[in-house]
Image (spheres, coloured by chain):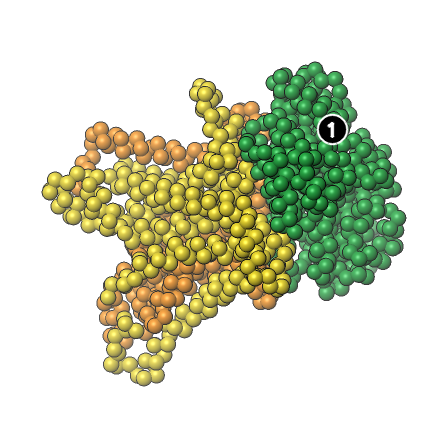
Chain colours: A green, B yellow, C orange
Amino acid sequence: MNAITRLATAVSLASLFPLAASAADDKGTIEVTHWWTSPGENAAMEVLRNQVKADGYTWKDNAVAGGGGSTAMTVLKSRVVAGNPPGAAQIKGPDIQEWAKAGYLIPDNGLDDVAKENNWDTLLYPTAAKIVQYGNHYVAVPFNIHRVNWLWINPEAFKKAGIAKPPTSLEELYDAAAKLQQAGITPIALGGQPWQDSTLFESVVLAVMGPEGYHKSFVDLDQATLTGQKMADAFAALKKLAGYMDPNRSGKDWNLTTADVINGKAGMQPMGDWAKSEWTAAKKVAGKDYLCVPFPGTAGSYTYNVDSLAMFNVKNKGTLAAQRDVAKIALGTQFQTVFNQNKGSIPVRNDIDMSQFDSCAQASAKDFAEASKDGGAQPSMAHNMATNLPVQGAVFDVVTNFINDKNADPAKAAQQLGAAIKAAQ
Amino acid sequence: MNSVVALPRATPVLDRLQRWLPKLVLAPSMVVILVGFYAYIGWTLVLSFTSSSFVPNYTFVGLAQYWRLWDNDRWWVASKNLVIFGGLFIGISLVVGVLLAVLLDQRIRREGFIRTVYLYPMALSMIVTGTAWKWLLNPGMGLDKLLRDWGWTGFTFDWLINQDRVIYCVVIAAVWQASGFIMAMFLAGLRGVDGSIIRAAQVDGASLPTIYLKIVLPSLRPVFFSAFMILAHIAIKSFDLVMAMTAGGPGYASDLPAVFMYSFTFSRGQMGMGSASAMLMLGAILAILVPYLYSELRGKRHD
Amino acid sequence: MTSAVLKPGLTPSRVLIYAVLILACLMYLVPLVVMLLTSFKTPEDINSGNLLTLPHVFSTLGWVKAWATVRGYFWNSVAITVPAVLISTAVGALNGYVLSMWRFRGSQLFFGLLLFGCFLPFQAVLLPASFTLGKMGLANTTAGLVVVHVVYGLAFTTLFFRNFYVSVPEALVKAARLDGAGFFTIFGRVLLPMSVPTIMVCVIWQFTQIWNDFLFGVVFASGDAQPITVALNNLVNTTTGVKEYNVDMAAAMIAGLPTLLVYVLAGKYFLRGLTAGAVKG
């Protein structure tokens, strides 16, 4: 290697923009199937891609947008059946266990020494670490922790409607909604898509039943709880809230409804912390131009949604090396900071300096640490964290049908929920 | 070998080769069709009797997946929608296509331009069509707002968000896309009709609508057949359209069996049940099509 | 036939006919106009106006941005579509020739099986097809995608040609055979020259189907080999981020432009081809 090449390599490593990725692509290639395609996510992934390239590996990007990853899942399955899985794919929650159980994920010793070298066992929040392990071995890499039970508020709109403070209980939420409606503002902004309906529903269940009831319903799938009076109450609350929404919300994307809150057409939006990226893009400042509060009635609880990249079992040695490299970088301090600042989530490592994050992220990190201690941290059902896909799908069907059917009966919906989950198990 | 005539002068070897050549030419396609269509259907049938979840497995569970399907509300909504959608889409496209073709056949000025206008939607992918119509029919954003801006204040058109009406929105978009093509097929058919028959009928004093209904259209029976084939093909493939337009919503009110099958097989991780739904769907298509194909093709060859 | 039916001139019934035709024209055009208008608006414009308001500022930003995103995939689509259209048309023509002029025991059954194939929902064959492609070593290649499109296009291409050749008088073929012409000679010298209109129909149909395909493209191609429809979907369906309808619509127009051009330029031949017999059973 002559001096100029060395210099060039050093410069490109330092700037994270390798001059020639091909110069070293014999080290190994990793193909990554994912659906992080929005501008913010793409910027975040670019950091990962560049670091992997700088380490001399080739990154083949297989981004498939759409349907909250359902298109990407189709692609992934067809590739696995073809005997040609990608090196890594965006798989979440209990699905990781299913893929691992079926023997498709990286073997036991694949990531464990990377984990050991980098102290994952102590650095990762235990909740997150458990998700990405199969039989005590790491098979996936967690990227972040999203909080789902947030409520995003436009304080301008609240002021206009004469609401003094953000609601902290369902009753206060109804009050605020009624006042907003009187002021001619759409009280609650929520797009009409099954996952959005269920995102609100799980927060309502958490508010009505508390974390224990939530856990019994969506993690234990306890029939008595699912069909009980409390569940009927949750459905009734959901119906009441649906009455405060834009009647034209069917099929609307979540970020378009966020835009309604940003420009004051709507008052508030129950949505996970990825909504923050919209506020940031609109150059709004947390705590001043918008407020983030826990969904009314769920303060002290925390529904989490952990994004992760599962590593597949591949024969190619170079790809295995690349997988390990991706794992190492993804949990590095720099990537964790940049990725999560873009994504709205909090780092999955407990040692990241949160002072570089905004007030919502700081609150999220604090709440997560506290909720983790007393069982307040619960996996999000609507975001594939609590159950496997068939059960989640069954819940989606019941909830979305209930919220769209004007004559639906809450008690009957609870019965249907129990029956649908039973049938999907 | 009904169409092969005796060849007195050919040598025996060449003769044999000639006789085998057609079969040899057809053979690759035959293999491809048997594997690519029928073996794959067979495989899906096998899967429908297994407990396959998110990837295929071969633990047999008998008819359990079919019973599950039977008990699934969403499947019934999807099936009912296919009947409504398929029937209306095929029917309306045929009527609109025939009507426009007959009108366009009356020595119209700028016929070429008008024809292109009717035909162009077929060039667009269903994803594009779905996206455009989702916009147009969106209450509060599309036509609804337009007409109110134009002073028609009481106007509301909210079918897209109405659980009972949404499937008709899909029909509208699908008819928009396909009817021009059907028009072209019938126009082509009309151009092939012998004009002297019509003149003779006119001399007999028959009115124009009667002539079309009684004489011209019945002679276009083969065109109806081809049009039906193409429309049925599109109806079954309308998956893309529904996904782009409503994604099956609101709720699952605009679900079609193809959407159901796709989401259960691939996104829900219930491959066995998805396969069962595919088999039922194929069975239904078979039940409708085979008698029709049979009656149309029987003794068709004019020799 | 038309010449005898109605005498040109402005009779009330002709006014009515024109009115209906023009109204229909408007209905067919509105979505295209809306898409075009939207693609030239700025995002603020889209939110403030309605569907048919003209852009306040005529902005090509959407087009520039859309082209930058989908440019690479545009050429992928070309590389997939051209060979797939040519191969499936050629094979369809030969199949149609055999099925109409050289029928043998079982050829009708084959035709029936093929017709039924037109109604196969493609979602049902995704997994076995990808399994087969994997075994053939064609998974995630453009070549694999071409194979898939040829296979699932065969049903229609064969149908088009078979229906056309059935309408060709058999005497032509018989005469050629008596002159000693062989299988391919008859096809090349007698039938192919008269098939141009049907070839046009077939090419246009296949071009539209393959260019617009999304399902096979997304499943059987990955990364840099993806066709434009997949890129369009990635652009339009991004789950997070700001929605830029002008970019979406411009990208949709770019994705649809080749097929639109084909229809506008070749529409005349298309009708001629349909008239020539492709629509006859």
Could you tell me residue B201's position as x and y percent?
Answer: 14, 44
Horizontal side of residue B220 vs A399, given as left or right: left
Q: Name the residue under label 1.
A: A296
Q: Quadrant of the N terminus of chain A?
A: bottom right
Horizontal side of residue A397 vs C166, given as left or right: right
C164 or A90: nearer the eye?
Answer: A90
Q: Residue furthest left?
A: B204
A407 or C180: nearer the eye?
Answer: A407
Mark 1 secondary-structure assignment: loop
Could you tell me residue A115's position as x and y percent?
Answer: 84, 54
Could you tell me residue C30's position as x and y percent?
Answer: 43, 33
A224 or B223: nearer the eye?
Answer: A224
Disc 1 marks a residue whose amino acid type is Pro
The subunit letter for the residue under badge 1 reads: A
Q: How crowded is mark 1: few (under 14 residues within 10 Å), some or many (20 or more)?
A: many
Q: Can residue C224 be seen in this view?
A: no
Give me the residue at 54% from left, 51% from top: B69
Give me the residue at 84% from left, 39% from top: A374
**Count of number-bearing discs:** 1
C132 or B111: nearer the eye?
Answer: C132
Query: In which image quadrant can residue C245 be found?
Result: top right
Give me the residue at 43% from left, 43% from top: B85
Q: Residue furthest bottom?
A: B12
Query: In which image quadrant can residue A279 be found?
Result: top right
Could you tell me residue A341's position as x and y percent?
Answer: 77, 37
Q: Can residue A321 be seen in this view?
A: yes
Give me the residue at 66% from left, 18% from top: A179
Horizontal side of residue C72 vs C54, given as left or right: right
Q: In this view, does A82 lie above or below A281?
A: below
